[in-house]
Image: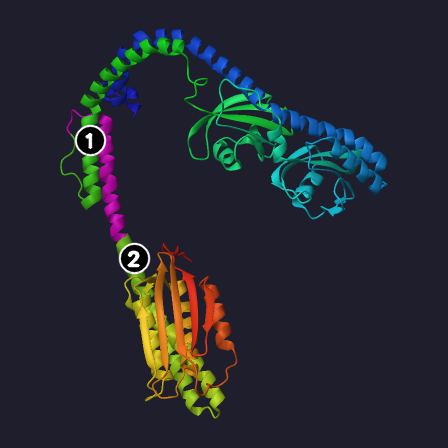
């Protein structure tokens, strides 16, 4: 705080004391250090920038030559295209002749304004009307260099140069030349006294055109906190920025083709050409020594006047954070007024936090009670619906109607089980999958397997937690799968049937549900296929994958689905 300057407490203010001691220490060296080092630093910085720009220009010789020749060729071909555009065969023959005369380009062609490329070195016409890149240059017809991608015509990695063709004020189309990546490697680069980390070219849209290293390294070394588009229009510049991994680099920009292609070299900050020379380091030694002496004085002043009191205040804050205990004794009168005001503000804030936390805890407890009550009532309502359906089942006259109502009743009871698990659990966001599976499956087996069937049932469930949003579709999926298994399990000869239900963890973030039953003997009643469709729908809700394994002895349904690693965000509606 600096408002102590405008009160009668100026000598007890922390800012006044620190500034007083720093002024005594830095006054002798301030003017000397600035006068001696400023001019040298500016000269060295300017020299370094010029050297980096010159090296960038030399390093980008191949790229400059290729792109300048490509744009020049595109503009030269434009006049010939206007003469031969009405005869696609003759125009294409000229393009092939031109392509054979040079080894730089992969494909040379003229794309009409409607997107058709009838005049080209390719062996057939191509339609680019639906191509997003073509639509982009059609909206802004000017010469452009497109980034490297797999060429549609050449089927190789190419950079594409396009130049608009006008007849008067009417846009006729674009002359397009594709430059394979190998073309940049054919031109011998000059020997450089210092080699950059990477050299890459880009267009005004900040898209990578080429690089002297692999594309992954070039993209990693591109600046992350400087927009390349903001540098467009400058002939050359040098700046520092962070690369994509947060490492500071020095970047040198050089224009290759105005408003179309630019070259940039990337240098480490400790490169010999970037680091200051011996003269700069020697001229900086004396100010650094005096600065160190000033720091000693400043540190002694700060430690005596502020740091020891700040440490005490920090311990009080940590104690409050750990066990919510506020300090019993305030700082003494010898402590700077700013720190005493800070302690008073801390105590006031701590008291406010304690009151707010008490209110928040009461609100949270009330919210949990209301949520449990909601789940409890939903469970009761679902069980009431199940009871009503049970009465309807007893009054149904046909076996098909009773079977449909009974299946619907099982689904409702499965949902009721989910809500029961939620209100019985302290955590209202997640449920115990093992307990939920066991209760749902036992409930289904108790209803579906008749007494004396001697069907062997195997259950295996790993411990895992499920979000409430995933518990409902999983429960309904299990209900459908187990019901199908009970309906189709082998019952003859007696004791040969087996049903196996397993929920296991495949990995830290995936689980696998498996429901298997033996087959054979008298087949179960034919179904409508609704169960299978429901299983597919519930599996999609879980983002799961279904796999069916069917042999002469066994039918197995396997669903693999992801497990959330963090609790889903609960929105306050």
Answer left or right for 22 relative to 101: left
Q: Which residues are magenta?
A: 332-359
Residue at position x 72%, y 36% in the image: 176
Q: Nearer the viewer, mark 1 or mark 2?
A: 1
Q: Quadrant of the N terminus?
A: top left
Q: In which quadrant of the rendered view does residue 174 lie?
A: top right
Q: CA distance from mark 1 to mark 2?
A: 35 Å
Measuring 41% from the left and 12% from the top, which residue is drawn there? 277
Task: State the residue position of label 1.
Answer: 311
Question: SS at mark 2?
Answer: helix
> The C terminus is located in which quarter?
bottom left
Residue matched to label 2 = 364
Q: Position of residue 229 (x, y in %)?
A: 57, 31
> Residue 403 occupies which quadrant of the picture?
bottom left
Taken as a whole, is the magenta stretch helix, strand or loop? helix
The earlier-in-sequence mark between 1 and 2 is 1
Q: How many residues crowd around disc 1 within 10 Å: few (fewer than 14), some, or many (20 or more)?
A: few
The residue sitting at 45% across, 71% down in the picture is 549
Q: Where is residue 92? Give x, y as percent.
A: 80, 40
Along the line of sight, the residue nearer the viewer: 403 or 377: 403
In the image, is residue 348 above or below residue 548?
above
Residue 286's spot in the image, x, y percent? 31, 9
């Amino acid at each position: 705080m600096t408002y102590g300057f405008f009160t009668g407490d100026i000598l007890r203010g922390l800012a006044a004391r620190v500034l007083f001691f720093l002024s005594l220490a830095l006054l002798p060296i301030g003017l000397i250090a600035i006068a001696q080092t400023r001019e040298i630093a500016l000269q060295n910085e300017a020299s370094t920038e010029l050297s980096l720009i010159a090296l960038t220009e030399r390093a980008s010789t191949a790229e400059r030559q290729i792109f300048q020749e490509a744009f020049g060729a595109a503009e030269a071909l434009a006049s010939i295209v206007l003469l031969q555009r009405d005869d696609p065969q003759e125009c294409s023959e000229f393009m092939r002749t031109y392509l054979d005369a040079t080894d730089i380009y992969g494909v040379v062609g003229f794309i009409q304004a409607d997107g058709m490329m009838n005049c080209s070195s390719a062996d057939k016409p191509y339609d680019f009307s639906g191509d997003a890149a073509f639509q982009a240059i059609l909206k802004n017809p000017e010469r452009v260099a497109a980034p490297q991608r797999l060429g549609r015509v050449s089927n190789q990695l190419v950079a594409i140069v396009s130049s608009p063709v006008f007849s008067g004020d009417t846009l006729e189309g674009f002359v397009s030349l594709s430059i394979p990546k190998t073309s940049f490697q054919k031109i011998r680069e000059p020997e450089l006294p210092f080699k950059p980390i990477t050299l890459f070219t880009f267009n005004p849209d900040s898209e990578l055109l080429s690089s002297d290293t692999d594309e992954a390294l070039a993209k990693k070394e591109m600046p992350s906190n400087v927009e390349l588009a903001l540098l467009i229009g400058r002939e050359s510049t040098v700046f520092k920025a962070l690369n994509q991994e947060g490492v500071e680099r020095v970047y040198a920009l050089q224009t290759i083709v105005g408003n179309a292609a630019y070259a940039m070299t990337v240098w480490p900050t400790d490169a010999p050409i970037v680091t200051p020379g011996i003269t700069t380091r020697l001229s900086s030694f004396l100010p650094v020594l005096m600065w160190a002496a000033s720091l000693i004085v400043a540190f002694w002043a700060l430690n005596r006047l502020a740091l020891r009191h700040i440490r005490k205040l920090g311990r009080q804050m940590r104690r409050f954070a750990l066990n919510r205990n506020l300090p019993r004794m305030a700082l003494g009168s010898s402590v700077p007024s700013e720190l005493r005001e800070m302690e008073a503000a801390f105590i006031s804030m701590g008291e406010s936090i304690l009151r707010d936390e008490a209110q928040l805890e009461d609100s949270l407890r009330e919210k949990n009670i209301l949520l449990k009550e909601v789940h409890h009532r939903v469970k009761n309502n679902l069980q009431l619906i199940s009871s009503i359906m049970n009465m309807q089942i007893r009054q149904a006259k046909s076996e098909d109607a009773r079977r449909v109502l009974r299946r619907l009743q099982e689904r409702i009871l499965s949902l009721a089980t989910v809500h029961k698990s939620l209100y019985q659990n302290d955590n209202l966001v997640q449920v115990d999958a093992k307990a939920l599976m066991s209760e749902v499956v036992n409930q289904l087996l108790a209803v579906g397997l008749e007494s004396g069937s001697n069907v062997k049932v195997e259950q295996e469930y790993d411990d895992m937690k499920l979000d409430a949003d995933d518990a409902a579709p999983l429960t309904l999926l299990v209900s459908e799968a187990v019901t199908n298994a009970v309906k189709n399990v082998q019952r003859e000869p007696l004791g040969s049937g087996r049903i196996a239900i397993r929920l296991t963890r495949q990995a830290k973030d995936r689980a696998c549900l498996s429901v298997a039953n033996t087959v054979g003997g008298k087949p179960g009643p034919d179904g409508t296929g609704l169960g299978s469709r429901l299983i597919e729908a519930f599996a999609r809700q879980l983002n799961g994958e279904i796999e069916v394994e069917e042999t002469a002895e066994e039918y197995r349904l396997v669903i693999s689905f992801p497990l959330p690693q963090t609790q889903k965000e609960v929105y306050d509606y």
